Each structure stands twice: as C-alpha cells, then as structure tokens.
Image: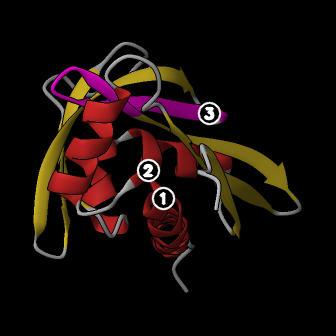
Amino acid sequence: MARQWSLEESVLVDADRATLYALVADLRNMGRWSPECRGVWVPRPPLRTGSRFVGFNRRGPFLWFTTGRVTTARPDEEFVFDVGVFGLPIARWGYRFEPEGAGTRVTETWQDLRTGRGAGLANLLGTMFAGTNPERRIAVNRAGMRTTLARLARAAAPAG
C-alpha cells in the first residue's frame, strides 16, 4: 500500500465557531481529547501565530515529546500548528471551523512533513519513540482524530 501523506476527519458539533476555536486554540486542552497527547506546555499563553509549545505524548508503552509552532491562528476560522522532534519536521495539524446549519463543522487535518533531508531519521525516530512506522501512522491518526473530534464535540456541547 502506498504511503498516505495527509488525512482529514470532520464532525458536526452543536456549538458556535467561537466556542470551538477557543477550546482548540488553547492547546493545553489537547490532553483531554487526544488519545496520544497527554499534555501541552505553553510558555506564553495565549497562543497566536508564531507561538511555540511542547507536547507530551504517549501511546501504550511509548513516550515522546514534540516541539511545536503555531503557523495559523485566525479566530473562529482556522488554527494550524507544526510539530517536530530534535529540529526535524514531523507533521502539520490543523482545525477548520465552518458554520453548518445551527452548528459548526470542525475539520481536523494532518499532513506528514517527514520529507526531504532528514526524513529517514524522522521516520526512524517515529518508529522508535512513538512505536508507529510511517505506513501505520495513517491508521493510528485516523482513529485518534475521530476520538479527538468526538471528545471535543462532547466538551463543547451545551449542558442540558
């Protein structure tokens, strides 16, 4: 099977764009939703374009950290960040917020940045630290994105 370099999942949420954007743009929340992310340290909140952060991740017995930088922060519309390890680019994650009916369609995107110079080392590190080789990463991410979006939708739902 050919390697897949990007992925997109979406969910319709009974909440407004501003609420959803605020939840996602505070990456310290990500540990509540993501099955891999255990927490995010943000040295200078709030996050905006150019802000840096550190993510702490776990999947089964595997533990690793990533460093990140916000590349797009357009309130109520889009939030995107790149993550890497040891200076090597790994992935670009993003969230889009589009009105749909009485709710908001939240789309989570992932793009593999392990290309070009350093890609072989980045792939090896991913296998060693995260326990997932590049061919399996798409399946792991698809399941994780669905879990993340479902948990985000529950967190944003109006009480009642």
Q: Amino acid at mark 2?
A: Leu
Write down the quadrant of residue 128 in the picture.
Answer: bottom left
Over which residues does the magenta segment extend? 77-90
Label 3 neighbour load within 10 Å: few <14, some 14-19, many 20+: many
Spatial distance from mark 2 to mark 3, Cα to Cα?
12 Å
Q: Is residue 32 above or below residue 16?
A: below
- SS of the residue at dot 1? helix
Q: Earlier in the sequence, mark 2 or mark 1?
A: 2
Which numbered disc covers residue 135?
A: 1
**Residue 28: x %, y % from top left:** 25, 47
Q: Which comes sooner in the sequence, label 2 or label 3? A: 2
Asked whether residue 86 is drawn in magenta, I would say yes
Q: Quadrant of residue 61?
A: bottom left
Residue 102 lies in the magenta stretch: no
Against 65, residue 155 (above or below) is below
- The residue indicated by pointer 2 is 23
Label 2 or label 3, whichever lies nearer to me, is: 3
Mark in the foreground, 2 or 1:
1
Task: Judge by depth and name the residue closer to the eye, 24 or 115.
Answer: 115
Q: Is residue 38 visible?
A: no
Residue at image coords 43%, 50%: 23
Q: Which residue is at a point 31% across and 22% down the rendered structure image?
A: 118
Helix, strand or loop at label 3? It is strand
Left of 112 or right of it: where is 53?
left
Q: CA distance from mark 1 to mark 3?
A: 28 Å
As displayed, is residue 88 above or below residue 23?
A: above
Q: Does 130 sit left or right of 65 as displayed?
A: right
- The residue labelled by disc 3 is 78
